[in-house]
Amino acid sequence: MMLSDLVGRRVKVARWDYAQFLAAFTGLLPIVRVPQGRVTHIEMTGNDVGDVWVKLDGLKLQFAFAHCQLELLR
C-alpha cells in the first residue's frame, strides 16, 4: 500500500513508547489500551517515505508517526 492511500483511513498507534501514557493521561482510555485516530495527511520526505499525520480520537492535536508505528483498522 502506498503511503498516500492511508489518508482518511482509521489506524491505531501500535508502536509508540508514549501511546498508552498519552491515552491514560488524557483520561480517554485505560492504561492497557492504545490510541486510535484518522490519518489526515502525509508529509513525504523521500521516495515512498514520509511522516503520517494522525488526529487521535478525543484530542484536538495531530501527531506524526512513521508508517511502521501504525496498524490499519477495518
Image: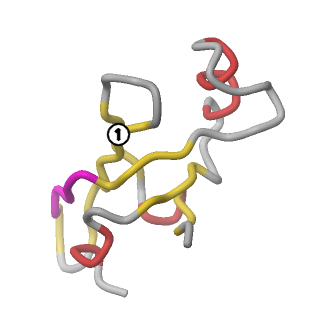
Q: Nearer the viewer, residue 18 or 37?
A: 37
Q: Quadrant of the N terminus?
A: bottom left
Give the residue displayed 55% in from the left and 72% down from the top: 74
Give the residue displayed 31% in from the left and 23% down from the top: 60
Q: Which residue carries the number 1 mark?
A: 55
Tell me, yes or no, whether the highlighted magenta stretch contains residue 43: yes
Left or right side of 53 for 37: right
Left or right side of 59 for 52: left
Give the residue displayed 54% in from the left and 45% down from the top: 36
Q: Nearer the viewer, residue 11 or 1?
A: 11
Coordinates of residue 12 in the picture (x, y in percent) = 57, 53
- Residue farthest bottom in this picture: 1
Coordinates of residue 49 in the picture (x, y in percent) = 27, 70
Residue type at tag 1: Lys
Label 1 packing within 10 angstroms: few (<14), some (14-19), many (20+):
some
Q: Where 44 sits versus 39, above or below?
A: below
Q: How is the image coloured?
A: secondary structure
Coordinates of residue 73 in the picture (x, y in percent) = 56, 66
Left or right side of 59 for 71: right
Q: Find the magenta span and give its range.
A: 40-44
Coordinates of residue 23 in the picture (x, y in percent) = 63, 25
| Label 1: which secondary element | strand
Give the residue displayed 17% in from the left and 61% down from the top: 45
Q: Where 39 sits versus 44, above or below?
A: above
